[in-house]
Image: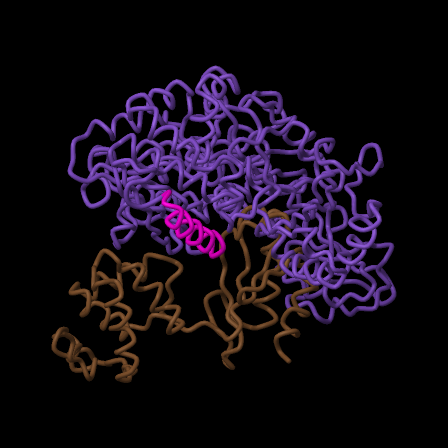
Amino acid sequence: MSTKTNTENHIANECPYNGSLPEVEVKIKLTADKIEKIDAICRSFDNDPGELINVLHETQSEFGYLPAEVQDVIAQNLRIPVAQVYGVVSFYSFFTMTPKGEHPISICLGTACYVRGSEKILEEFKKELKIEVGETTPDGKFSINCLRCVGACGLAPVVMVGERVFGRVSPEGVKQIIAEYNN
Amino acid sequence: MHILVCDGTGCRSSQSGLISEMFRDELLRKGLKNEVQVIRTGCFGFCEKGPIVKILPDNTFYTQVRPEDTAEIIDEHIIKGRKVTRLLYLDPDTQEYVSDSKHMGFYKKQLRVALRNCGLIDPENIDEAIARDAYQALGKVLSEYTPEQTIDIIKRSGLRGRGGAGFPTGLKWEITGKNPADRKYVVCNADEGDPGAFMDRSILEGDPHSVLEAMAICGYCIGASNGLIYVRAEYPLAVKRLKVAIEQAHQYGLLGEHIFGTDFSFDIKLRYGAGAFVCGEETALIHSMEGKRGEPTNKPPFPSQSGYLGKPTNVNNVETFANVPVIILKGAEWFSSIGTEKSKGTKVFALAGKINNVGLIEVPMGTTLREIIFEIGGGIKNGKKFKAIQTGGPSGGCLTEKHLDTPIDYESLTAAGSMMGSGGMIVLDEDDCMVSVAKYYLGFIVEESCGKCAPCRIGNKRLYEILERITKGKAVPEDLDKLRNLCNVIRDTALCGLGQTSPNPVLSTLNNFIEEYEEHVFEKKCRSGQCHDLLYYVIDEEECTGCGACKRVCPVNAISGEKKQPHIIDQKICIKCGSCMEKCQFDAINLKNEYKSTTVSV
């Protein structure tokens, strides 16, 4: 059904305002095999718009994030406006439009962790890595995110690096955690 | 013999996976592989002391087991029959080791109904669940009862929704059942978004079949053959175990076409959340399942009339479902004999915060907060003083010492200005600033508000700003009235449950801790020392050597003093940057929540 070869053309056709904007963001061109991958994911959900969230989950786990170009392709496949896809992507905190670091650091700010001092841990990470929440270090190694409760309240305050959970973290322990991944 | 190793989230995070591997390896090495079985179970609840290992049949309960302890447990306990005392639970009061969990303060007052199989069975093995009566209730319902009779049992049991609002479950089923439609849906709400709550997660991870079975029973009652579980994507382990459980139930013919050879067919599919707290609200949840933004809509129409894809939909919470099979097997009378007059059965709570025994507990309705905090919870951490307990998550409120002896049920918690909510309980001690706690919850609400209605989107933002002013010492007296008025307006006018309950943390702290608010506003003082802007950098005259390092580093020249003489900080000039404290080598500079005005230089 889909015969896309270049997403840029597609955007230019669909968004008449694109050309008149003073600065047009340079789009990342998706390679044909990437487009094919997205097509396959959409097909596996029968291109059903009701499965949009599942499609986005799968796509994000494939690409690591959901840039605008990817959303375009999904919108085309599911035959819905790209605004609707973007609306869903921006609504849910699980979806991200910027790539995360190689070691994504998530600091739990759930209540149990909060009352046991997780804000200080967050400050320490921001200070050590010199980035803000939602940002990635220039070398692409670390990114900081906050999440609310991973259900390991017995270990509060909790920090996750990738899938690994660090419990009972102290502000002094932050350096150690970073050092462990810096080697 | 059996070695049970807790595989819940808490224990898993402290290497329980490795522990069970090492047990298996060690047993293999000792040639005991066939005599002793290692089982990875769901959560035991006692997360504070994890990882937990339990040995059956003698019921020995080992706490805080490390991977290197596994060999000793096998050598001593399994082979020689001697308990490894140092790994047993040490009763903090008697200073004696307790080996059987039944005699531990944490478990004594608990009654496990919804959590009946958590910590007992391997959740990825349907045979173990069946050995503990799983799917028996479904068989009984399909062969002995009509849908009406089944609904009647649930109604008589007095079971109410465990997700927060407490709507009678039987009545909900009856209403959905009576709405005619060609297709209906049973939905399990497993979008446990309350920070600090992990009840549903533990049930799904420890005993998924209880939920699947109950959904099928519900489907039979309301005339639905499709079930959907809306589960958080943040719970990968729960998702995995649900998938395994659904597949195994299919293989055994307990889900799918013609269950138990009857005309009843039922299938369950999973839908994933994507990190939006508001999706716990049932209309928002349904929109999210349809692949849309999870924004709530006005009720009516209720989901029981027009829900998923416009069809009648029955939405229940995980814990509610987990209660259903036991009610069918043991009877409505048994269930309604537990609890208080209007709230029957038990409730699971996630106990966390400044408490000694953090964990998952299940107690009969009507248990007092004092019993929960001081007997089961083991009191406040580090011997501090109890200040408040926050129940019901961001929609709930803070209860204080005067509420400690109130028996807990839906009505009493609401009357006290909080709510049952899904069951998170966070204990706060004297070091917690109640204004900051209210601000914390508002921050959460501001982030999670979907933005559809103005009271929630704009009102909560304004509330947050007022609270921020208070904690920064910039509030004016009128702010307190504004705060209360705005809370009332939001409560009365917001669209959905999230918005209507969002001012609760503020209102309940205003009601119970007004003196703390007043201190912040009038005296610019935070008694617990949590609000940084209300603290002062003060030089300790005794410790100060007069080296002048602080004076040199101060960017605004707020520090004065002669060489070798104690220095002082002019609080009127100080911008609280903290450079001096960092520079001082003698720990002479401290943060205090008040300062003697006599020490301030003129």
**What's the residue at 34%, 37% (across, down)?**
B260
Chain A rendered in what hue?
Answer: brown
Whether residue B464 appears in magenta in the rendering, the answer is: no
Splitting the image into 4 quarters, where does residue B69 fall? bottom right
Q: How many marks?
A: 0
Residue B198 visible in the snapshot? no
Question: Percent x, y for residue B337?
Answer: 51, 16
Q: Which chain is purple?
A: B
**What's the residue at 49%, 74% (across, down)?**
A101
Q: From the viewer's perspective, is B404 left or right of B73?
A: left
Residue B95 or A177: which is nearer the viewer? B95
Question: Percent x, y for residue B281?
Answer: 34, 41
Splitting the image into 4 quarters, where does residue B259 fall? top left
Residue B362 or A68: which is nearer the viewer? B362
What is the span of residues highlighted in magenta in the rendered image? B235-254
Up-down: is B40 above or below B97?
below
Q: From the viewer's perspective, is B232 left or right of B567?
A: left
Residue B305 visible in the snapshot? yes
Question: Percent x, y for residue B596?
Answer: 74, 45
**What's the residue at 27%, 53% (across, down)?**
B293
Question: Percent x, y for residue B487?
Answer: 40, 35
Whether residue B246 appears in magenta in the rendering, the answer is: yes
Q: Main secondary structure of the magenta part?
A: helix
Residue B378 or B469: which is nearer the viewer? B378
Residue B472 or B237: which is nearer the viewer? B237
Which residue is the extreme one toward the top? B341
Q: From the viewer's perspective, is B235 left or right of B179?
A: right
**What's the residue at 50%, 21% (across, down)?**
B412
